[in-house]
Amino acid sequence: MNQKFNRPVEILLIEDNAGDIRLTEEALKESNIKSNLNAVMDGADAIAYLNKQDNYVNALIPDLILLDLNIPKKNGKEVLELIKSNEALKKIPVVVLTTSNSESDIYKTYDLHANCYITKPADFNYFIDVIQSIADFWLNVVSLPSQV
């Protein structure tokens, strides 16, 4: 189990690239963090998941959200804005994990209260290291409010 959780942690990955989803799954499997990774591939499904609508009525509220900005239907900034304006969701840490290194994207996501912004590394091994570092930091090092 994880140091601060008496259960596997719930991670929601909002990512439209199947390869990055697989890499994230592999990185989490190799880490010492017991987790359940749920992935959705567009912004509309992300909102449905977080609001427990449609196919996601039994979804668990995530302990951590990994959010790509460049996703279809609703982009990552729109999803982030909806998360951080929702009283029930706004305390969930949202890590923006995207290919963009645009200063305007970085500023905008912090203005929308992202918890951190990481540009996806192109190198396979470094990507794995980054995912494991994110999980370790947010799920073992920091103190998070409990989900009620």
Image (cartoon, rainbow, N blue to C red):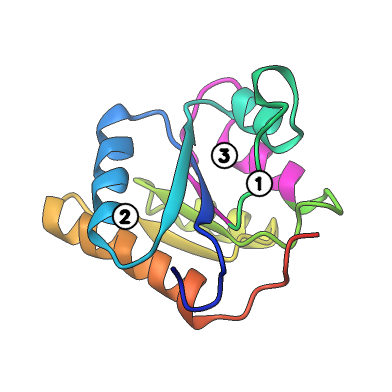
Precedes in sequence: disc 2 or disc 1: 2
Q: Mark 2 is on which residue type? A: Leu
Looking at the figure, which quarter contains the N terminus? bottom left
- Residue ID at (31%, 68%): 32
Q: Say which residue label 2 marks.
A: 28
- Residue ID at (55%, 77%): 4
Looking at the figure, which quarter contains the C terminus? bottom right
Precedes in sequence: disc 3 or disc 2: 2
Up/down of 125 relative to 140, above or below: above
* 28 is within the stretch colored magenta: no
Residue 142 is left or right of residue 91, and the answer is left
| In the foreground, 36 or 18 | 36
| In the foreground, 110 or 14 | 14
Q: Say which residue label 1 marks.
A: 80
Query: Quick check: marks 3 and 1 in contact, CB under 8 Å?
Result: yes
Disc 3 to disc 1, C-alpha distance: 6 Å
Up/down of 48 relative to 98, above or below: above
Task: State the mark number for residue 76.
Answer: 3
Residue 46 is left or right of residue 17, and the answer is right
In the rendered image, residue 103, in percent from the top left (x then y), is placed at 47, 58
In the rendered image, residue 107, in percent from the top left (x then y), is placed at 57, 60
In the rendered structure, which segment of residues is drawn in magenta?
64-83
Q: Is residue 74 visible?
A: no
- Residue ID at (17%, 61%): 126
User: Dot 2: few (<14), some (14–19), or many (≥20) neighbours within 10 Å?
Assistant: many
